[in-house]
Amino acid sequence: MSSLTRLFSAAGGGVGTLGTNGLAGWAAGDGAWPWVTTVLSVSVAAGYCAIAINWFFQSKLSRHAESRAALARLRNISILCAAFAFVLYSRGDNPWYLWRAYDAALLVLAVHAWTFVIRTRGLGLVSERLKQFEELERSATKYREIAELLPHMVWTATYDGRVDFSNQRWHEYAGYDCTWLEALHPDDWEHAWALWNEALASHEPVSIEARLRKADGPRETYRTFIIRATPIARGDALKWLGACADVEDQKQLAAEKEMQARQKTFFLNALSHDIRAPLHNVLLNAHLLKTSVTDEADAESVQMIVENALAAGDLVTKLLDFAKVGAQDHNEIERVSLGALLQQVVRRFGPVAEQKRLYLRMADPDVDAFVLSDRQKLERIISNLVDNAIKYTGRGGVTLDLIVRDGEASIEVRDTGVGVSPEHVPHLFDEFYQVNNYERDRSKGFGMGLAICRSLARHIGGDVRLERTGSDGSCFAVVVRDQQQHQQREQIGADRGGRPRRADGDQQAAEASGLCRV
């Protein structure tokens, strides 16, 4: 006999057993009770299904608290229903009061289930989810239409990383049956997949450099790409928009430039040796000749040979130094104490300043800052500026000041010299440009010092500029940036998915960028 048949017969059988008198007779004999039991059972089952659907979507949306609550309700309902079924259907005939207790329990379960459904919006969550998907699909369609007009390779992916669209540019490169995930070079596959899975888990933009296979050609050809992907969220729904930029030509160009730089450095080193060797021989022989000549005219001629040989040597040194600036593509990065560096420069040029009765000092010897940079190049920049300041200062002296502000260090070289006329300021950093040296007096230099300073400073991510000048002297500033910070800024500029660093005050900004006041 089926359960429903047994339910009806058990409910009706209570009439003959207890009669029709009083409340007990009414509760046992009313023929509507089987239908009440059926309706309550269906209500509990419907509530159970609604909670199950709610649990499914909550788990898909990663709403863990709501998902656990729904699962707990499902577990409670299942346990109670199993207990009721065991009690009622394990025995043959049940008294009427047991069926009425069963009806009351069903009513409590129905209220329990539908209260939860109403509080959590139940099936309304399904409608909301479908609307989000529809809106996301409309956005994806719009993006696809735009993507087909772009000259770059563009693709989209679902929330779990499955590529569902690639534009025509990609198909022309890799074919119609291949996504960028399937075109990865075997050696790049593991690294690229790790970054991609990490981005899928964190919902953060990602940038991957990898080699991708090209479809045409008799053999497999790979080119290097920068693959960038950005999540697009609509409510709780998520899609990925990505692009592949071919950087193979840029990498080859960078490799060629590096090779040319190495070759140029080797050539300049060899040229320096080959030119200086005969000049040294000329100077040596001129000095030997100077010790042996007795005629005053001959001695003057020998002295002229010595002076010209020295001038030629200085000119060669300056030219080679300027040429090497463009060839030095590699910086020897180390942690540099700017305060100690300035003190070293003061000790080095102190005797030179004393000979001219000038002072050379630091504005505040206790100030220090640390930066990751090329110490040798920094020292050359500051030394050139101090040398120029001493050379063009007749009285007073030169002051070095270290300033740390907004995560950036600045070294000022201030003198009390003659200053620079306004008409010369625009050309001050040009090669071979000299102020007030129309006779080309070699003792005043060759006009390359400031050009070398600016080139070296920019090579390490900084700059040299004229802050102010006038009749009371000039002030040159060397901007020193941390190399690690400089590289991160360039990376952020290339990748819009990057986030700016948050700084709380000058001190924290300096510490975050590698600059620390002491």
Image (cartoon, grey):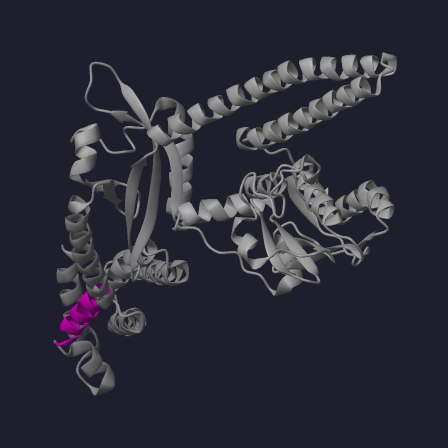
From the top left corner, tell me how far across and down residue 11 is, in percent.
Answer: 18, 70
Magenta stretch prevailing secondary structure: helix
Relative side of 510 to 112, left or right: right
Q: Which residues are magenta?
A: 32-45
Relative side of 68 to 422, left or right: left
Relative side of 265 to 353, left or right: left
Rendered view: 177 above or below 67: above
Rendered view: 360 above or below 197: below
The residue closer to the viewer here, 143 or 61, is 143
- Asked where in the image residue 320 lies, by quadrant, the reply is top right
The residue closer to the viewer here, 78 or 311, is 311
Residue ID at (43%, 29%): 254
Relative side of 253 to 172, left or right: right
From the top left corner, tell me how far across and down residue 356 is, in percent.
Answer: 84, 48
Q: Quadrant of the C terminus?
A: bottom right
Rendered view: 397 above or below 216: below
From the top left corner, tell me how far across and down residue 52 is, in percent.
Answer: 27, 58
The residue closer to the viewer here, 11 or 469, is 469
Examine the structure image and report whether residue 341 is included in the region drawn in magenta.
no
Q: Residue furthest bottom?
A: 22
Q: Quadrant of the N terminus?
A: bottom left
The answer to whether residue 177 is visible is no
Residue ID at (65%, 43%): 372
Rendered view: 234 above or below 432: below
From the top left corner, tell me how far across and down residue 491 is, in percent.
Answer: 46, 44
The answer to whether residue 473 is visible is yes
Examine the structure image and report whether residue 33 is included in the region drawn in magenta.
yes
